[in-house]
Image: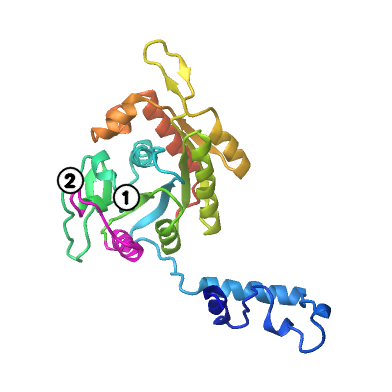
Amino acid sequence: MGVWPRLLLLLPGASPWGCVRRSAWPKSGPASSWRPRSSGADSDALKDRRAQIMARGLPKQKPVEGVKQVIVVASGKGGVGKSTTAVNLALALGANDLSKAIGLLDVDVYGPSIPKMMNLRGNPELSESNLMRPLLNYGISCMSMGFLVEETAPVVWRGLMVMSAIEKLIRQVDWGQLDYLVIDMPPGTGDVQLSVSQNIPISGAVIVSTPQDIALMDAHKGAEMFRKVNVPVLGLIQNMSVFQCPKCKHETHIFGADGAKKLAKTLGLDVLGDIPLHLNIREASDSGQPIVFSQPQSNEAKAYLRIAAEVVKRLPPPPV
């Protein structure tokens, strides 16, 4: 007997044939006359049993102390500008409403980029309650694994160690009182995404993609993953949507045109906005002066500001 049938036999009422219960097997008579018993009651019982098994071991969601609403910025694929979007979205949320307190959490343990983009260095100090204090720049409270390891040091950890680190980045940080905590997710649909989604209540997820078909395939998976874990998807952001020649002003859709709009229609979602492929965005991010901060009147910054307004419109009311 293989490994999976043995494991299935350990589950009460289960059989190595998945949906066929032991009690459905014939006690006597020719095999050709046997048929699995099936009824609505049996089906409901199996569904209930599966739900119980799936629920075992899942952590109960607990709000982040002092944080009213959590927004996750995710993508199915790397290299689509997700972190740049997360940084500028956080800044745009604050710029649109100066009364709001904003935090930015980088949970990309293997490749943290927030420290460079936010021009932050140094180790977090400990508060009197032995919690890490976020580093502050441009009015945004930031926390990242990049503050705790050397910039060039690789993080060579297995999944359980990564989960433990993320738990500390969320729970052992003195965030103070925040209206919005923007979480920059790593690419993909793996352990980190599940851990964050199952541990804390998330107000909404934003999916970032280029219009390219290959990126959109993974963006589709990312949106479906959040739906499976009951996280509302606020919409899609189409990044690098168009390139305008700085000399002749001719526009070229390098990665394709309107791909995110087509995907949004398929998923029944909205496109929150388009971000152009522009040299200024890249240079501002690399210099640690995000474009929403350094060039707030530029068309590129205004695109992020409009997206932030669309995100806020779609958020549920904050808890009282």
Residue 129 sits in which quadrant? bottom left
Residue extending farthest to the bottom is: 28
Report if residue 133 lies within the magenta region.
no
Give x and y (percent) for residue 46.
Answer: 66, 75
Is 253 rendered above or below residue 216?
above
Numbered label attached to residue 219: none
Q: Name the residue under label 2.
A: 121
Residue extending farthest to the top is: 248
Is 133 rendered above or below residue 73?
below
Instruction: Tell me if residue 138 can be seen.
Output: no
* Residue in the image at 44% along x and 66% along y: 61
Task: Provide the secondary structure element on which disc 2 rests.
Answer: loop
Q: How many numbered callouts?
A: 2
Numbered label attached to residue 106: 1
Report if residue 165 lies within the magenta region.
yes
Task: Provide the secondary structure element on which disc 1 rests.
Answer: strand
Residue count near mark 1 (Cα–Cα under 10 Å), binned few <14, some 14–19, many ≥20: many
Left/right placement of residue 318 relative to residue 283 reads right
Residue type at mark 2? Arg
Label 1 or label 2, whichever comes before in sequence order:
1
Q: In front: 164, or 300?
A: 164
Residue type at mark 1? Asp
Quadrant where the N terminus is found in the figure: bottom right
Give x and y (percent) for residue 76.
Answer: 46, 46
Give x and y (percent) for residue 97.
Answer: 37, 39
Left/right placement of residue 200 relative to residue 164 reads right
Residue 33 sits in which quadrant? bottom right
Measured Cα–Cα span from mark 1 to mark 2: 14 Å
Quadrant where the C terminus is found in the figure: bottom left
Task: Give the magenta range.
Answer: 148-172
